[in-house]
Amino acid sequence: MINLFRLEELQSKKLKYALYAIFILFVVAGTVLIKYYRNIFSSNIDLGEKTELFIHIPSGADMETVIHIFEESKSVVNLASLKWVMEKKHYGESVKAGRYRIENRISNNDLVNLLRSGHQAPVNLTFNNTRTLEEFAGKIGKQIEADSLSILNFLKDEANIKPYGFKPETVIGLFIPNSYQVYWNMTAKSFTERMYQEYVKFWNVDRMKKASDLNLNPIQISTLASIVDEETTKNDEKARVAGVYLNRLKRGIKLDADPTLKFAWGDFSMRRVLNKHKAIKSPYNTYKYAGLPPGPIRQASIAGIEAVLNFEKHKYIYFCASPEFNGYHVFARSLREHNKNAEKYQRALNKERIFR
């Protein structure tokens, strides 16, 4: 009987030990599972008072580069746990470049899923009021991945832009100033391709017909519009200015457009055009050569293009800046009337001591 009792006691102790061991195992397993759960599903992004963060992952980046980007952003609570989840989900095998919107308090799991999906937040790309191709490339290079130099070199290479129907001297007319939603990781080529699609949309049937009625093509319209834009910043005057130049073109009279001289001299700050400026040997010198210059002298605005397409019909052949310096111009039908207007403006310039 004693041996049986001891046997039962030993079995009872073994059972207790076994149950205790199982309990410890469950505790350890539970702790590990909780840790894994937190690593995967708990919030790991802390943006403070901000609700979102935009991360830019460059083309060719690897997982370590992405980890470094998040480290630099100082937005990740536990960087090691993020790296662990990336490894478990094999993120390093398919890092997708782009601009990503990261929400506050997002989990590692949702963050890595977002990055793996390649679902980018588009960029609202905007450009307007640009004079030179260099200035334009600089503006675009600040908004997409492609830098300004790669954009400029692409647009200056005739082999690249010939398929779109442009030359280096006309290519600035390809880009219609506006705001567009694009993806950040664009190359110079993909950016140009997208803008060409927008160009084709802009030059719809209605605008093409109006251009054809003027015996001009879209590039010539943009060239004339660029001159109109340089002549006046007043949108309510652009159609009248356009009408003057169209009247001159129709009659075979040289445009005598001061902005084309400023372009030829490379000095847009020039306020007073003198006879020596008119002597420059340049195809953009519309005081020497009849017709339109080889291409736009700036990026024509939509308002400028519309002003040319919907020009004001009148008999004015001349105009000059108002002596009141109010941004508007005075118009004339005859050279005699124009000379009187120009004399008033010259006196006003002298009075203000504006000699260049």
Image: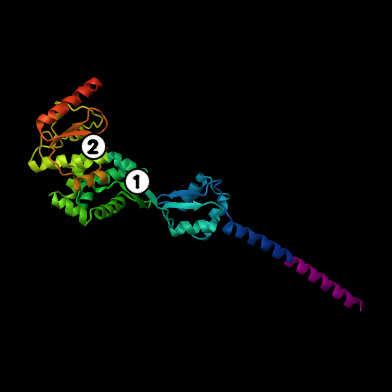
Instruction: Please provide percent x and percent y for residue 301.
Output: 26, 44
Q: Nearer the viewer, residue 138 or 319?
A: 319
Classify the position of the N terminus by image quarter: bottom right
- On residue 242, the disc is none
Disc 2 element: helix
When asked about the image quadrant of residue 18, the answer is bottom right
Q: Is residue 114 above or below residue 296?
A: below
Q: Residue at x 37, y 43 (%)?
A: 142
Range of the magenta residues? Answer: 1-22
Q: Residue at x 79, y 71 (%)?
A: 15
Q: Main secondary structure of the magenta part?
A: helix
Q: Amino acid at mark 1?
A: Thr
- 336 with respect to 227 (left or right): left
Classify the position of the C terminus by image quarter: top left
Residue 146 visible, this angle:
no
Q: Nearer the viewer, residue 170 or 5?
A: 170
Tell which circle, 2 or 1, labels the residue nearer the N-terminal end.
1
- 343 with respect to 302 (left or right): left
Question: Residue beneath label 2, please?
Answer: 230
Circle 2 residues within 10 Å: few <14, some 14–19, many ≥20: many
Verify whether residue 11 appears in magenta. Answer: yes
Instruction: Please provide percent x and percent y for residue 272.
Output: 21, 27
Disc 1 element: strand
Instruction: Please provide percent x and percent y for residue 198.
Output: 28, 53
Q: Nearer the viewer, residue 112 or 94?
A: 112
As drawn, the residue found furthest toward the bottom would be: 1
Please state which of the two labelled residues, at mark 2 or mark 1, is closer to the viewer. 2
Q: Residue at x 27, y 31 (%)?
A: 326
Q: Amino acid at mark 2?
A: Glu
- On residue 126, the disc is 1
